[in-house]
Structure formats: structure tokens, C-alpha cells
Amino acid sequence: MIAPNDPPGGGAGDRWRPKAVALSPRALKELGRLGADDRRRLGEALARFAATGQGDVKKLTDVRPPVYRLRAGDYRALFALTPERVEVERIVNRRDAY
């Protein structure tokens, strides 16, 4: 978990700042294929992370530029972070995520 006072890529003393969530066209299409419950669960998890920096998020290793994954049920959101946004690139089932 990434704590609010230890944001990804942030230096010492940085605090989490709320961010907007942006979905790539591919992620939007993948989100539309999910069932209603999975779509709701993933949306709530993304909104919570964007607002607070809290959630089941890990930085993927050996990936440049940095990519993070957010886990929500059987699905993973793969995203990049900017100072202003959570940029979701993919939404995949956990069996296909990596």
C-alpha cells in the first residue's frame, strides 16, 4: 500500500494531492466489458486511490517509465502517475495482468 504521506515518486515530506482519473481509450473499452459489480468495485478503488493515495497499489518492478497496479477483486488497473492525474492504461483480469 502507498501511504498518503509517502506518494509514489515523491520525496521526503511530500503529501498526497488528490488527482483526476484519466482512462485511455483501451482502458475505457476494457472497463465497459466488465460486469456491473466488477466495474463498480474497480471504479470505487480508483476513486479512493486518486482522492487519498490509499488502496492496494504496488509499483511494478523493472518497468520504465514507472507503472503501478491497483488491485480490485479479480481485476487490475495498470496506470502511470503524474502530479495531476492517475492515467489508467489497461484494465485486465488478474490471470492476464502480467
Image (cartoon, helix red, strand yellow):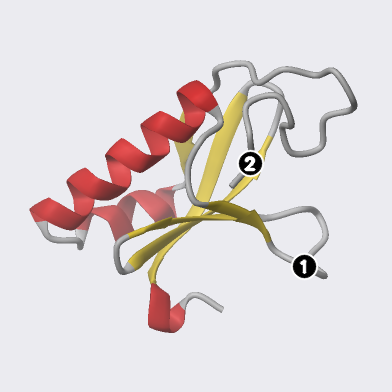
Element type at mark 1? loop
The first of marks 2 and 1 along the sequence is 2
Q: Which residue is mark 1?
A: 61
Residue appearing at x 56%, y 40% in the figure? 87
Residue 20 x %, y %: 49, 23
Note whether residue 68 is visible: no
Q: Mark number for residue 29?
A: none
Q: Amino acid at mark 2?
A: Ile
Q: Which residue is mark 2?
A: 2
Horizontal side of residue 77 vs 73, given as left or right:
right
- Quarter of the picture containing the C terminus is bottom right
Residue appearing at x 35%, y 64% in the figure? 75
Find out whether the residues at labels 2 and 1 contact each other: C-beta distance under 8 Å.
no
Note whether residue 31 is visible: yes
**How many numbered circles are shown?**
2
Q: Residue furthest right?
A: 12
Give the quarter of the image for residue 80: top right
Q: Nearer the viewer, residue 23 or 37?
A: 37
Element type at mark 2? loop
Horizontal side of residue 83 vs 91, given as left or right:
right
Q: Amino acid at mark 1?
A: Thr
Residue appearing at x 56%, y 35% in the figure? 86
Horizontal side of residue 10 vs 93, given as left or right:
right
Q: Residue furthest left?
A: 36
Q: Is residue 19 above or below residue 1?
A: above
Residue at mark 2 to residue at mark 1: CA–CA distance: 15 Å
Disc 2 or disc 1, which is closer to the eye? Answer: 2
Give the quarter of the image for residue 45: top left
Residue 4 x %, y %: 62, 26
Horizontal side of residue 53 vs 8, given as left or right:
left
